[in-house]
Amino acid sequence: MEQVGPARAPRGPYRARMIVIPEAFVRATVAREGEAGAAWVRELPRIVAELLECWGCVPDGDVTHGGVGVVVPVHGDGRSAVLKVSFPHPGNVHEPDAFVAWGGRGAVVLYERDDGRFAMLLERAHAVDLTQVEDGDEVVAVAGRLSRRLAVPAPAGLPRMSEQTDAWERELLAESEELGHPLPRRALAAAVATLRELGRDQPDTLVHGDLHGRNILRADRESWLAVDPKGYAGDPAYDGGTLLTSRALTLLAADDLGKAADRVLEVFAEAAELDRERVRRWAQFHAVQASFWGRRQGFRTACGGPRLDDLTVLADRLAELLSRCA
């Protein structure tokens, strides 16, 4: 594939009916997506304006953003909501399908959708997320209880994780080779065994796919509601691994990493009513993925420097520790 230089981020804030697209989001999108991202960002104010008019909403607060989309607080039809518009990407296709399947049980309600523009009008939750809770056990228990509630029969058409496991195995083996085999053989073998023994025969259950504290928000209708699902069909224990790796900064501060990781797995499995061994195995797989990902691209909380080194070492240690548990 031909390599090109990074696209230049358009200058100045983007506006659409008092809407300002955050410059940090513009820069990150262009850096990640290149010219396609720059072109989409240029169109984003028009897209937002058309959706506001179509769904009869007016802006009702400052625009925020996640990794791939902007969130506009709005008011309309007698209710507070948020307009979310994401960069068109295959990983965002099934987010509204998950919300429809849940129907507001444990997740925000979907009011409107425009799949062609990767846009949704959603129930508004608060800006407080689960990471702001100080009690670590409570954070994990809340996530586990939500995981249990979200584990409903998967609707037709969702991507089946069982169909992705062969590709995941090939990626792990190729990355280990390219990176010079940074993990002990036992750790990589354990992750591959999970894909072969658990990954290819998974339940037909809706899985959030990215369940961590930042994707669980304080709300009024329920205490906590999930946002930003990937919408997979597969094993709910998979989300236990997502949660464990998302607790990296807390685990870094632990006096005994093994005990701290074991506590997360125990609390999550009990709250989610899942088999702890399955949760452990998926968590070990996630740790191996994180180890390789950190070496290739860095992490959201650290793209370089000592913190990146610390998090990569943590992923390595988790990958090895969890492969030893029985």
Image (spheres, rainbow, N blue to C red):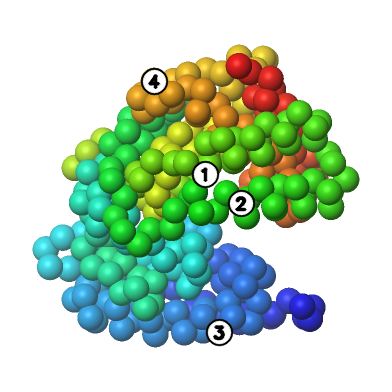
Q: CA distance from mark 4 to mark 3?
A: 47 Å
Judge whether 177 appears above or below 35 on screen. Answer: above
Amino acid type of the residue that numbered disc 2 sits on in the rendered structure: Asp
Apparent side of residue 291 relative to residue 277 in the rendered image (left or right) = right
Of callouts 1 and 2, the N-terminal one: 2
| Label located before the other in sequence (2 or 4) | 2
Is 241 displayed left or right of 124 in the figure?
A: right
Q: From the viewer's perspective, is the residue at label 3 or at label 2 nearer?
A: 2
Q: Which residue is mark 4?
A: 270
Q: Residues within 10 Å of mark 1 (few under 14, many from 20)?
A: some
Q: Which residue is mark 3?
A: 39
User: Pointers 1 and 2 in contact (CB under 8 A)?
Assistant: yes
Give the percent coordinates (x, y) of residue 184.
Answer: 81, 31
Give the residue pinned by disc 1: 200
Tell me the residue that label 2 is attached to: 166
Give the mark nearer the N terminus: 4 vs 3.
3
Toward the left, the furthest residue is 78
Provide the secondary structure element on which disc 4 rests: helix
- Amino acid at dot 3: Ala
Q: Is residue 13 visible?
A: yes
Q: Position of residue 277 (x, y in %)?
A: 51, 23
User: Local crowd at mark 2 within 10 Å, few (<14), some, or many (≥20)?
Assistant: some
Question: Front-most of 33 and 49?
Answer: 33
Q: Quadrant of residue 311?
A: top right
Q: For the residues carrying marks 4 and 3, which lies nearer the camera in this image?
A: 4
Q: Is residue 191 left or right of residue 47?
A: right
Q: Position of residue 278 (x, y in %)?
A: 50, 28
Disc 1 versus disc 3: distance between alpha carbons?
39 Å
Instruction: Indicate the amino acid at tag 1.
Output: Arg
